[in-house]
Amino acid sequence: MYTNWSSNSATFTTLKWYRVDTIASFLHELRQYIINTPGKFSATYLPKPPKSELPASVNERFPGAEGWLCEAIGDWNAKFDCLLLAANVMVNVNRLDRKYPEYKTAGDAEYYCILSINELLHMIASPELGEVIKQSAFEQRYALEWYDDAEDAKSIRLGFSRLPSFSSNDDLISKVKNGPSGELAHNDQKFDE
């Protein structure tokens, strides 16, 4: 569990998070829709963007093997929003009357979408750009500490470490008499587990 979740989660729990694989799948699906639709585009068949989801909770650790995108981290989301706008204009050509700077015709909007999709895929695939968030970056960014054992997490939160456990009184007496290593204990010897 995350010991300091409540003090550090106010910011990132209000933001939209997406698994990289769901965004990549959406981009591929949208690209195929644009390229393979022979006639007029329809909003009914336009692929829907994935729903956002929170990658972690107080009791669920940020996935170690998955990459995530956050709307507030990096430049990908501005490009993604522009792509969604262009795709909407592409299926609702009457919106071209609004005079967008990037496209003047439905064909311009289609071309803009294809370029944006390729750029977004490049951004996702380029670790040096820092768009994709992994477990260690998430925990470091939000100063979160994960403990696998709930008892350890509680004792850390309370400011003391967990006391060693003994399987029986005989085990405890043996440790006191002989020390943790089995050798005879001296009065000044410390007994750390």
Image (cartoon, rainbow, N blue to C red):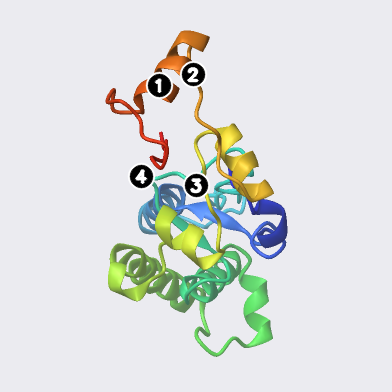
Residue 179's spot in the image, x, y percent?
36, 28
Name the residue nearer the viewer: 129 or 87: 129
* Amino acid type at mark 4: Ala
Q: Residue at x 60, y 33 (%)?
A: 151
Residue 2's spot in the image, x, y percent?
59, 47
Q: Residues within 10 Å of mark 3 (few under 14, many from 20)?
A: many
Instruction: Kindly indicate the quadrant of the structure image that contains residue 87.
Output: bottom right
* Amino acid type at mark 2: Phe
Question: Which of disc 2 and disc 4 is earlier in sequence?
Answer: 4
Instruction: Kindly indicate the quadrant of the structure image that contains residue 132.
Output: bottom left
Question: Which of disc 2 and disc 3 is earlier in sequence?
Answer: 3
Look at the numbered discs 3 and 2 and tell me whether their residues touch, using CB distance below 8 Å: no
Residue 39's spot in the image, x, y percent?
46, 55
Quickly name the residue at label 3.
62
Q: Nearer the viewer, mark 2 or mark 1?
A: 1
**C-alpha span from label 3 to label 4:** 9 Å
**C-alpha span from label 4 to label 2:** 36 Å
**C-alpha span from label 2 to label 1:** 14 Å
Name the residue nearer the viewer: 153 or 53: 153
